[in-house]
Image (tube, rainbow, N blue to C red):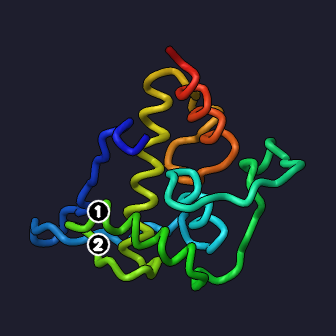
Amino acid sequence: MLDFFIPTYITFVQQDTLNGSLVAKEPKSMAVSSPEVIRHVLIGLGYLAPEIDPKPDLTKFAPWKRNNNSLTDAPTEEAIKKFQKQYSQKLVVNGNADAETRTVMEDTVIGLQNRLKFHGFATNAEIPPNKPFYGPATYTAVKKFQKSP
């Protein structure tokens, strides 16, 4: 599934109007920030095995149990390392969900969502642009893709 999309990374710069030079923009706020959201990304991308919720509310969440505990348990640290190894040219492989790792996670989810929408498995109404949450809409779109001929 990871090769389903082509990730794009944009350098965020703006022109300094006083002297014409380029300066870094203020960093965007991270949507991938809480332990629960990070686990959803790791599970959705196949790095972490989910604990399936027997009665999931698919209108709000993907079908695995919610867990907002710290990211220090062995399976989660190993999943973060696996993710970091996939992007080892950009990330230090240490099992910590640091800012750089979260940024790549966010970009990865946005890339996946954009490719799913481009190929007709979801719409902007279902998955709003720049909302990198691997929730029920992304889960449903991936399932549609997996079932497609």
Mark number displayed over residue 54: none
Picture residue at 73% right of the left edge, 60% below the top:
51
Q: Label 2: which residue?
A: 91
Number of residues whose C-alpha sits closer than 10 Å to that of mark 1, classed few (under 14), some (14–19) or many (20 or more): some
Identify which amino acid the numbered label 1 is placed on: Tyr
Picture residue at 27% right of the left edge, 53% below the top:
9
Of residue 114 and residue 91, the one placed in the foreground of this image is: 91
- In this view, which residue lies farthest toward the right? 55
Of residue 142 and residue 114, the one placed in the foreground of this image is: 142
> Dividing the picture into quarters, in which one does residue 12 lie?
bottom left
- In this view, which residue lies farthest toward the top? 149
Cβ atoms under marks 1 and 2 closer than 8 Å: yes
Mark number displayed over residue 87: 1
Identify which amino acid the numbered label 2 is placed on: Leu
Picture residue at 45% right of the left edge, 81% below the top:
96
Does dot 2 land on a helix, a strand or a loop? Answer: loop
Number of residue marks: 2
Number of residues whose C-alpha sits closer than 10 Å to that of mark 2, classed few (under 14), some (14–19) or many (20 or more): some
> Dividing the picture into quarters, in which one does residue 74 lie?
bottom right
Picture residue at 62% right of the left edge, 73% below the top:
34
Does dot 1 land on a helix, a strand or a loop? Answer: loop
**Percent x, y of residue 147:** 58, 23
Say which quadrant the N terminus sits in: top left
**Percent x, y of residue 127:** 60, 39
**Percent x, y of residue 56:** 84, 48
Left or right relative to 27: residue 142: right
**Percent x, y of residue 40:** 62, 59
Q: CA distance from mark 1 to mark 2?
A: 6 Å
Of residue 83 and residue 38, the one placed in the foreground of this image is: 83
